[in-house]
Amino acid sequence: MAENQVKVAFLTPEFPLPEFGKCGGLGSSIKNLGLALKEQGIAVTVVIYGQYEDSERDYLGMRLVVVKHLRLPGLSYFFRQIKLQRVLQRLISSNEINIIEAPDWTGPSAFLPVSCPVVVKIHGSDTYFCALDKRKPKVFNTYREKRALLSANSIVAVSRFCGEFTQKVFHCSFTFTRIFNGAVPLQVSRSNPQRSVVFYFGSLIRKKGVLELPQIFKQVQSRIPNAELWLAGNDSIDVFEGISTKSILQSAFEREAVPNVVFRGTLNPNEITEALAQSSVCVFPSFAEALPMAWMEAMFQEKAIVASNIGWAAEMISDGVEGYLVHPKNHSEFANRICDLLENPDLRTRFGTAARAAALKKFDIQDIAKQNLDHYRIVIQNYAAKTK
């Protein structure tokens, strides 16, 4: 099959453009992969559902098909699926797409009959994250997510841990292919930080371990009083407290620490790169991830990292080689590892160099795009053979 015969549509509720609202790693990974596939001659469509209007336009050579959310109490999901099916089937019938990739989050490809193969990519479902976060998922979400997985023509997981843990939480067995997310390996933005800046970027949300940072940073300051902590990312309503996570954090930092804690807000990609250049150490004390894009970006920028040691982490970072991996609840060890790096520039440089080398080997988006493209070809061929 020639490359130009693969015409992929990504189904997503988010995309990293301001008009589509908040966007996390899912939307960023789709943008990265879509642009890389386009560079390899593949027709790429992104179907963005749950929006405020219907529209279509070009974005950097990719076609964006925006689908308005129909808000009908008790019937929204039913009518959304009918509308999505019509939109996708129109694209299939007009030969604009011949394979669909859908995320596992809330199972958008469940109850969506279309005449082309569907790949479900496991980025982390609601059921998956609730299990890691020790919360009870919504029953309907679990039902849809499991249905989407079991009805897929193929399943891809962005980490082995994510795929295996998904099997566990849904109590089912399925075959999956691991293909990492990828990012563009931008040139390293070099700086010589004059201050001891510890940088966290990502959503301000409990599952990412941000509520552990006040206790961790307290111990960092007891050893390095002039250390600073920068936090960047979207705020969120805490699932347990029902209030802003940022407000919980602000009240949790001790008075002495407050002058050295800076909330940077939501930063665009260029601002993230600039903040990375000015920081000394990146911290990611997550409890629930699939394959976090923020870690990847920090690795590509040669930053020393102290991160969670849960599940997916070992597929990204080797403890003591490209960074330190520590359980987020072990505040003392987490803080000590941060301090070791703040006090030792040579160690930071060694870890950062190793981190970029590992990222180039595992997460270069051009290599990741080729792996996805090879997989799409196989899925399309198998689908064609079965439907003859």
Image (tube, helix red, strand yellow):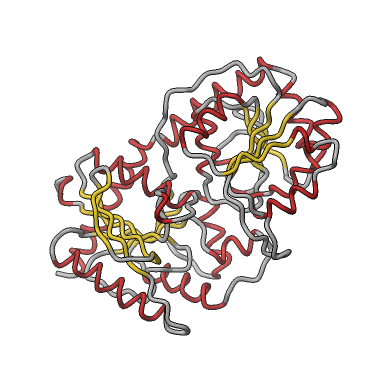
- At a point 49% along the width and 29% down the height, the residue shown is 300
In percent of width and height, residue 295 lies at 55, 38
In the figure, 274 relative to 77: above or below?
above
Q: Is residue 125 above or below residue 35?
A: below
Task: Give the residue drawn at x 65%, y 25%.
Answer: 280
State how many labels appear.
0
Of 127 and 270, the residue lying toward us: 270
Tell me where residue 371 sits by quadrant: top left
The foreground one among 79 and 96 is 79
Position in image of residue 53 (x %, y %): 33, 66
The quadrant holding residue 199 is top right
Of residues 384 and 359, which is closer to you in this image?
359
In the image: residue 358, left or right of residue 279: left
Which residue is situated farthest in the bottom direction here? Answer: 74
* x then y, percent, for residue 317: 58, 35
| Residue 36 left/right relative to 205 | left
Q: Position of residue 205 (x, y in %)?
A: 64, 53
Q: Is residue 176 visible?
A: no
- Does 113 sit above or below residue 256? below
Answer yes or no: is residue 147 visible: yes
- Quarter of the C terminus within the rendering: bottom left
